[in-house]
Every structure is written in structure tokens, then in C-alpha cells.
Amino acid sequence: MNKQIFLGVAMLAAFMQPAPANPVSRRATITGGGGSGRCTIEVTVDATAEVEVFGDTGLLTTTSGQPAAWQRFQCNAPLPSNPVGFRYVKIGGRGTARLHQDPRSTGGRAVVRIDDPKGGSARYTFDLQWGGLQSGGPVGGGWTPGPPPPSPGHWPGPRPSPEGFPMARTIRVCQDSVTSRLNRHGYQYVTFENTLPVNNPGRNDWVTGRANGTRGFGTTRFSFSCSVDFDSGRVHSVHVHRGR
């Protein structure tokens, strides 16, 4: 009799546990703009969850464990329906976080599946990146930072050489170099305000812009410039300066 009562109480307690609200939606915080597209997403997951992103909307679905929670959803532009050069980059998390659905084959919906095998919840951070610039077109305003690039020339439109390296990829290579530089100095989250290709005679070309780096609870503004070869996409040097 006592055993039956115990089982009944246990089953009632299980049924009375609040079910997680699925899915939990969130709108992206759009900051900056220009250059390649990027969304940085951070969530807390206890066991398994899925993150779906389309446009500037995200859906977080808990499939097992305690309810997953949004921590950050920041983009410099909404995810387009057919993102060119799309990349998924895992930044942090003790378990696995894999791209489950590629937005290029789903009409602009990216789905990331997260599996956290250990007890308790953990934070997972990842980037969705894509090209955001038509080849040869300028991005952002005409601001030029203080580092050593020469005086900017006017970007004349598409380069005549058909072998030229796609401009969006050149900009992304520069931004990735800047991100790696700031990551090494402890800035875990890096977003870009604007990025401007500067075309000069010969092979001495530059990509310049502004970026924000977050370390701990503080955000620092930086200016940057990359010496690049627009024909090959090679970055010769990277200059990053604080607060310009």
C-alpha cells in the first residue's frame, strides 16, 4: 500500500513539473552594418536544444533537459534567404553544436543542433557568417581610420580582370584576421560597424573599417586596416587600433 502511494505521488509530481515553453523566440539586435554578414548567437543548454534563425528572428527549442535560454543574438544584418558564402563557426561550448540545416538549401533557415552531454547547463556560442557585398561595390560610409593606409582612392566599380578575387571574400578574410587578432587579446565577441575597400594604383590596396570587441562586461571600439591584394584575396598585414 505504501509503495503504491509513493508511486502515485511520484507520478503526480512528474506531471506537475512545468513544461518548457517551446520554442522561445527572440529578435536579433542589429548593430553596425556593411561588409560581410554576421550573427553571433549565445544560448544556455542543459541537455539538447535546437536554434533556428531566419531573417532577424531566432527560435530556441528545448528537446531534452532543463529549458534552454537565450543569452545573446546580435547581427549586423538579417540572415538573407540565400546567403552567399555561408559559414557556420562554433566559438565556445563544452559539447557539440553542429549545423543541422544549411540556409542555402532551406530558403534562408539555419538550424544548429546542440548536444550537451554533462550535467547542468552550459553556454554555447557560434557565428553565422555570409558574404554581404556585391563584387566591386563599396560598403559603409566614407570614414577612413587613422592607421597607416594611404589616402583613399575612389572605388571605380567592378574590377576589369575576370580572375579577380571576389570582393566579399576579400573583406571577409580581412574581418577574420581582425577577429583572430582581437580573440588573442581576450575579446571573445567581435562585431563590425562598417568595412570599406580602398582601391589604389598597383597592388597596394586596403580594407578599412571599425569594429567592436567585447571582453568580460566591457565593449571597446577599434579601427582597423588590412593591406590586401584584391586579385588574390591575400592579406599582407593587419593594423588594429583602440578607440579610433
Image: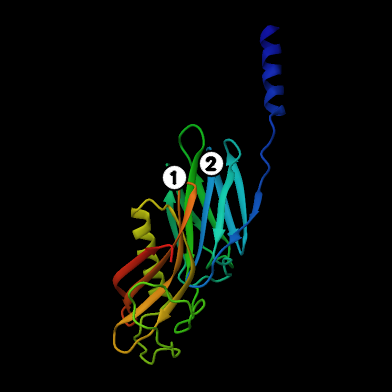
Q: Quadrant of the C terminus?
A: bottom left
Disc 2 marks a residue whose amino acid type is Val
Q: Residue 48, percent across and down?
A: 53, 42
Up/down of 83 relative to 212, above or below: below
Q: Secondary structure at mark 2?
A: strand
Q: Could you tell me residue 150's position as x and y percent?
A: 34, 81
Q: Quadrant of residue 68?
A: top right
Q: Quadrant of residue 229?
A: bottom left
Q: Amino acid at mark 1?
A: Gly
Q: Which mark is residue 93?
A: 1
Within 10 Å of disc 1 (Cα), the crowding (few <14, some 14-19, many 20+) is some
Can you tell which quarter of the image residue 58 is in?
A: bottom right
Query: How far across and how far down the image is residue 140, in percent?
Result: 51, 76
Q: Contact (CB < 8 A) between labels 2 and 1?
A: yes
The residue carrying pointer 2 sits among few (fewer than 14), some (14 to 19) or many (20 or more) residues within 10 Å by Cα, namely many
Q: Which residue is mark 2?
A: 45
At 51% from the left and 78% from the top, the residue drawn is: 141
